[in-house]
Image (spheres, rainbow, N blue to C red):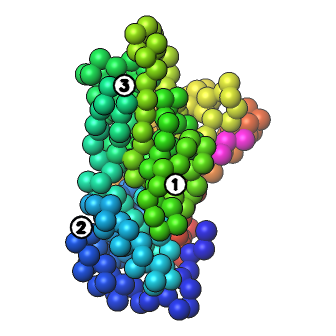
Amino acid sequence: MSESAPPSALPTAALAERLRSVPGLMVREDEPMSRHCTWRVGGPAALWVVVETEEALLEAVGLIREANERVVPVDGQHLWVGDGGADGVWLRLGACAEGISREGLRLDVGAQTPVAALASYAKREGLIGLELYNHVSGTIAELLRRDEPPPTLVGVRVLRGGRLTEVVPGKLKDDHVIVRARLELDPAQALKGGRAPKRGPGLPGRLFLDPKKNHNAAEMMSELGLRGVRLRSARLGGYEPNTLINLGGAKENDLKVLIGMVKDRAKSHLGVDLNPELKPLGRSRRSDG
């Protein structure tokens, strides 16, 4: 992913003014990404735009493309931006990508809806098939972006090539802006009910990917005695070690050193290569280290 705008790009301030003229947009320049990331780490995004309507989304993306700027879809809070900040227009959807509506066994779900909220809604409505998502963190968009969609997913409403359209599961691209998801529960499953799996998908919030299908990074980290390990203001979870907690003031380099320590220990003691789930976007601060 390129981190510099084309030479012909419209100056950020000028693009910001154009975007502010569009109803349904909230625009901020040099927005600290630490406010919007789970780990509370990250320098400023050149432009941060919250979009409330689909009409505003279409107009905003048109203006951004005219300015030769890059759109960075923000699916949720599980992202990592370098302390030096990042270029581009960071686009987060608001009201147009929130809420759940139902028609029979069909659900229309906003991409920014928390996954656990969808599971709670299904339970209240007496719908079966989404129980394993009760304790999954992150948004529907993050769920889809990780290519771990619910088995009930039948379509995804996205912005693609300057227009809104629906794509089928498996056809979602990195540059698509995810707006909504369409689910259809199996009536046979809904009638039958059944027992939900003990463990749902490992979704947003993890520090490391599970190395193999039958191995769990959190269990390995527990075996290595890494629960609650702390480096300055960055600490691994005490109960769930495969999570990271910013105690206040942790920096990008603290995360990198802590991640490196865990990787080294897993390799030397277990012979396993652990890979971080996230890589920092944008620029590192040169003074780090």
Residue at image mark 2: 24
Q: Nearer the viewer, mark 1 or mark 3?
A: 3
How busy is the neighbourhood of tag 2: few (under 14 within 10 Å), some, or many (20 plus)?
many
Which dot, 3 or 2, sits closer to the camera?
Answer: 3
Which callout, 1 or 2, points to the residue nearer the camera? 2
Q: Residue at x 27, y 22 (%)?
A: 125
Mark earlier in primary sequence (1, 2): 2
- Image coordinates of residue 167 in percent, x first then y, are 53, 48
The rendered magenta stretch, by its main secondary structure, is classed as loop
Residue at left offset 48%, top offset 29% = 152
Residue 129: percent from left, percent from top: 43, 20
- Give the x, y percent position of residue 214: 68, 24
Left or right, 232 with respect to 161, comes to: left
Q: CA distance from mark 1 to mark 2?
A: 36 Å
Q: Residue at x 28, y 37 (%)?
A: 101
Residue 44 visible in image: no
Q: Which residue is mark 1?
A: 255
Start-end of magenta stretch: 273-277
Q: At numbered mark 2, what does the secondary structure look like: helix, strand or loop?
A: loop
